[in-house]
Amino acid sequence: MDGKKLEYKGEAALKEIERLTSEADIVQQNILKEILLQNQKTEYLSKYLRGSALDTCDFKKSVPVITYRAIQPYITRIAHGEGSSLITGKPITEMLCSSGTSAGEPKMMPSIEEDIDRRTFLYNLIMPIMSQYLTGLDEGKAMYFYFVKAERSTPCGLPARTVLTSYYKSKHFKFQAPDAYHDFTSPYAAILCDDGDQSMYCQLLSGLVHRHQVLRLGAVFASAFLRAISFLESNWGRMCDDIAAGRLDPFITDPECRSSMLSILQSPNPTLAAEIQEICGCPSWKGILCRLWPRAKYIEAVVTGSMAQYIPALEYYSKGKLPLVCTMYASSECYFGVNLQPLCDPRDVAFTLLPNMGYFEFIPLGGNGTLVMDIDEDEEVSGRKLVDLVNVRVGCYYELVVTTFAGLNRYRIGDVLQVTGFHNRAPQFRFICRRNVVLSIDNDKTNEEDLHKSITAAKKLLEPHDALLVEYTSRVDTSSVPGHYVLYWEIKHHPNNLVANKLVLDDRVLEECCIAVEEELDYVYRRCRSNDRSAGPLEIRVVNPGTFDLLMDFFISQGGSINQYKTPRCIKSSAAIELLDGNVKASFFSPRDPTWRP
């Protein structure tokens, strides 16, 4: 990577950010040349590059802009034992499972050993940035909820896991040099525990034991942090018992978790247990985070994109007194940049892309930030239309395209971004949305096509009962934790199935429709439901006849065109949701978890 040094700290880290952003165009050109030099003889690139491997103009003219469908055959071949030289000049050490899917299975992204260095480089910048705005962050502990996901292997034995699981199991995380900024309450064994409930219990219990030392709260995603609060609501009594008695609940059976936790619960502490019991026993939990961890200065979590729906809940539990901090922008494919103004309003978060993390290009988009899907995933995009990092324009919308050392070439990430400004020569972007994602609670990302396919399969269960699904829409309900998908169905029925003008359908039929939808949704959603417990049972709300006509009237009254109106497959307008909920006549939930196997 540009600049071999990784351990930038304090002032040195801030100076490195200034250097990289001031020379963004030069750094980008050098990164592209390094990638081409490394990967020039791969099967993939050699198909397109005819002249010098370092001819960046030839790269831009000849190498196509692609989606996962184009690179998947190469990744599959490598996963089955063929050489990494199909796409990269360095050995592929693992496959990173993206939250996106292909044919219902997680997309697998190639990763080489040096990639973990690049990710660590970005992580090392966070605390120097934060320390510009808040002092004393090295005088206490961080209570961050970190979890590993289920791991598997490719047919040839390469690890296949999420990027965060990879990082938490790496030497970079486990063997960090002693640093006051990386003093976590959670024992390493609790983070690596495969049992999500045992891991959560131990991490929360550790945070309570160290409650007077905690300066920072957080999780990777806002949804995970709220899941921790919900878990605490159900288990704080048991945790108080553990603290008071100086022992660990028999529920914790993982031997490494028990060993690490017993070293924390060294002796009975009834005074601390009584403090926590008094706080958690209050009728209202508004502001409870500040009461349980009175020295906390902020909450760190991703609150952009689909995670923005959790901002009101976080503000409720902190009583609006703790800033919500979103520090970095990253994906399984590549880590991109950092938030240089971390204490900004979470609705105004913008990320500065660091030019040494990969080679970045951008597809110009139209629209106003909500209607920017004018380029479909499978639509061919001319490489000549792409814009370089330093040439994007403030206020404009783009789709991010990345070229990496691990073998992704002009790969469409699928993120829609808006340029909000520049830091030196490096642009700053606001994350708008994932292309074509309509529903998301945690790591799940359900697009319109997958939603339609799952509902098409489920509605067949209505046919034996002379009932027909005539219209539908959806939303995510986060009024409780975990959140869940809600489908609004308008069902037309045969006159023989009417009693007093009401539809007669056995409740079990609609419940089976719920689980049928879930069984057809992708691998990541089913994992969130069945293993991670980060999504609740899907709900179908049956609405009165004519409800979708009222919905159309509503949107037309808001300025829509009757000639161009299409029922939105996901509803976000609070007024539209109120209209739908006001016409619900019955509600049904999935009776069981969908099938999921690691």
Image (cartoon, rainbow, N blue to C red):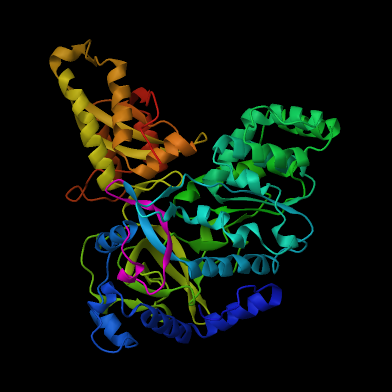
**Quarter of the rendering containing residue 61:** bottom left
**Residue 546 position in % (x across, y down):** 23, 29
Name the residue nearer the viewer: 431 or 563: 431
Name the residue nearer the viewer: 538 or 422: 538
**Quarter of the rendering containing residue 506:** top left
Q: Is residue 340 above or below residue 154?
A: below
Highlighted range, magenta: 81-104
**Residue 3 position in % (x across, y down):** 56, 81
- Is residue 245 visible in the rendered image? The answer is yes
- Is residue 535 visible in the rendered image? The answer is no
In the image, what residue occupies the spot 62% across and 69% down?
125
Q: In which quadrant is the C terminus drawn?
A: top left
Q: Is residue 408 above or below residue 294?
A: below
Q: How many marks?
A: 0
In the image, what residue occupies the spot 20% across and 24% down?
462
In the image, what residue occupies the spot 28% across and 63% down?
74
- Left or right, residue 157 beside residue 463: right
**In the image, residue 90 lies in the stretch drawn in magenta:** yes
Q: Is residue 119 above or below residue 57?
A: above
